[in-house]
Image: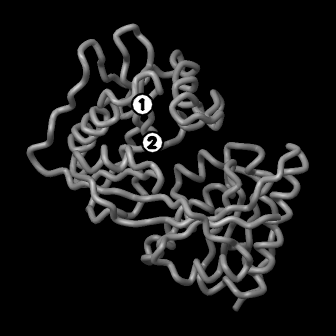
Amino acid sequence: MSILNTRSYTGSEDLQAMISLTQTLRGRGCQVYPIATDLYEELADQEVQITARLWENECQQLAGFAYVNRYQNLVDVFEPEQLTSLLENDLIDWAIHAVKHRNQMKNETQTLDASTLESDSSRIAFLERHGFVRQAESSILMACPLVEPLPEPKLPVGFTIRPMGGEAEIEAYVALHRSAFGTGNMTVEYRRTIMSAPDYIPELDLVVVAPNGELAAFCVCQIFPDDSPRGGGVKEGWTDPIGTHPNYQRLGLAQALIIKGMHLLKERGIDTVILGTSSENIAMQRTAEKVGFRTVSNTLWYCKTV
């Protein structure tokens, strides 16, 4: 067992090393997330950069890293053999300090949150050992094989689906996202970061336009080259996130967007589409089930008061 040194995140070279470590571990069959796009998007945020730490061996090779993302979630990736009880304690102590500091800076009282697949007993034990409490809500992953014939998207008269209009439409998109989810989590800056990520495909970034020209709904379809199959396919793509403005809900817009995304992803060689939703979002689950999705995994959420 090598002795590890820890240090703060310093920029793009560290980002590439973190991406490389996650890819190496997934290549060994480990269920390791985040993927490269997640790291690129999350570490573009200075508040997240401040929390990020890297652990290296004597040869300055990366053995693990961790950070607290913009939603207060602990993201940690380590070589399995390096995660000793001493390192666990160091990791949790650091994460608690990071959240306390952020809370003080923003005058908030946020918890430290973390997630794990329901099937990952060792991760569950790790979180419970360190005082994390399981939450009632979880995140469901659903998958659908792209077999012929695919259904055709159906929209109300006057509604159309097209790619999001780039920089010129960012502010309208952000307003739609905030209305759809009832939060202020999406910002113009964060949307720009998403659109500048290396694996972003503009043609798959879909919106529904209402007859009056307003953006009514969205679905970001995505293909991540370094994402190991999660839904039972060989080559998988995402139809997620999806959102509809409250003024245009219950018109079938989300279902039409998913089906349109399925067609576009199939054209790019994808054999299985996946999407995630909350265990409490029954409407989204039913919408996905109507076009052939089934639940393939469940991610549990835990939180720790700091």
Please name whichever residue, 208 or 86, is drawn nearer the observer in this view of the structure: 208
Quarter of the image holding residue 80?
bottom right
Crowd around label 1: few <14 · some 14–19 · many ≥20 (10 Å)? many
Q: Is residue 17 depicted above or below 12 in this figure? A: below
What's the residue type where badge 1 is placed?
Answer: Phe
Of the residues under marks 2 and 1, which one precedes in the sequence? 1
SS type, badge 1? strand
Labels 2 and 1 touching (C-beta < 8 A):
yes
Residue, disc 2: 241
- Residue positioned 44% across, 48% down in the render: 281
SS type, badge 2? strand
Image side of residue 63 versus residue 240, left or right: right
Q: Residue furthest top?
A: 212
Residue, disc 1: 218
**Residue 269: assigned label:** none
Crowd around label 2: few <14 · some 14–19 · many ≥20 (10 Å)? some
